[in-house]
Amino acid sequence: MAFRDTRSKIIIKTPEQIEGIFRSSQLAAKTLKAVEPFVKPGVTTEFLNKICADFMRDHGAKAATLGYHGYPKESCISVNDVICHGIPGPYELRDGDIVNIDVTTILDGYFGDTSKMFEVGQTTEHAKRLIAVTKECLNIGIQQVFSGNQVGNIGFHINQHAVKNGYSTVYEFCGHGVGIRFHEEPEISHIADKNTGPVLAPGMIFTIEPMINAGKARAKVDKKDGWTARTIDGKLSAQFEHTICVTKGKPYVLTDIDNEFEVPAEIF
Ligand code: MF3
Ligand code: CO
Ligand code: CO
């Protein structure tokens, strides 16, 4: 009986590569900080995209999304029932909207990928709770990032937390290895079986980016633009994303600029 070598295609980054991916990841996170003050009622998502695009360019980076499989913009901006891959455009934000902005930078050839939720004006308690639980789901996933653990345990714990709170986890879009290319191995499902998938080892870098729905889990992609993924029932969806490096100890959250996570002393 033969076992599949599930690790073979996962890139173990060198210390030099980790440093480069860290710098790109920090810039991606700073881009979200830079756009934050502009997220207000009346502003178009196209304008928010321009703020992100200018910030990345002015700091020496390229936006990885622009031209990626034909994607037309420098960010993804997903409002309310849009799960992910919302294309910035003429839509004007309204009081009560919830918005995910997702940016991926290429700095000195290295990729950093992060997204977070923004609230426009006064949002409902229901929306606030969905956002809070989605952030908890990401943090619970991050706690599973340690050497020797299996990838599946990330999604197992994320989905368990979502379901416990009456929500559902999107299964059509996943986290992914990142750093040297935009989307690398492994795929990080946010709903997985316990103790399944590749074994984590120091130097692996990937995103965790749970999309949590208030209603049904299913996504449908807009037939006209080929990108915008919406919930099938029109209910709200939220998402947070970090880029994370596996170390011999605690997870190293490369896109953390709010010092929410400890920085491990050593990686290998
Ligand atoms: N940044 C997204 C992710 O987290 C990917 C966007 S791909 C695009 O993986 F083409 F839609 F931009
Ligand atoms: Co990603
Ligand atoms: Co992203």
Image (cartoon, helix red, strand yellow):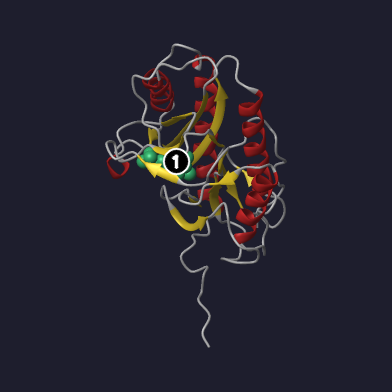
Residue 248 shown left or right of residue 46 in the figure: right
Of 18 and 251, nearer the camera is: 251
> As displayed, is residue 222 above or below residue 51?
below
Badge count: 1
Using the rendered view, name the quadrant where residue 86 is placed: top left
> Which residue appears at 43% of the width and 38% of the height?
230
The picture places residue 165, in percent across and down from the top left corner, at: 69, 42
The picture places residue 79, in percent across and down from the top left corner, at: 47, 28
> Which residue appears at 67% of the width and 62% of the height?
149
Whether residue 19 is visible here, answered yes or no, is yes
> Which residue appears at 61% of the width and 28% of the height?
127
The picture places residue 100, in percent across and down from the top left corner, at: 50, 30
Hey, what amino acid is under mark 1? Ile
Label 1 crowd (10 A; few <14 / some 14-19 / many >=20): some
Residue 216 shown left or right of residue 250 in the figure: left
Using the rendered view, name the quadrant where residue 88 is placed: top left
Under tag 1, what secondary structure?
loop
Residue 266 shown left or right of residue 63 in the figure: right
Of 120 and 2, nearer the camera is: 120
Q: Which residue is mark 1?
A: 232
Of 93 and 179, nearer the camera is: 93
Q: Residue furthest front?
A: 233
Q: Disc 1 beta carbon < 8 A from ligand 1?
A: no
Using the rendered view, name the quadrant where residue 241 is placed: top right
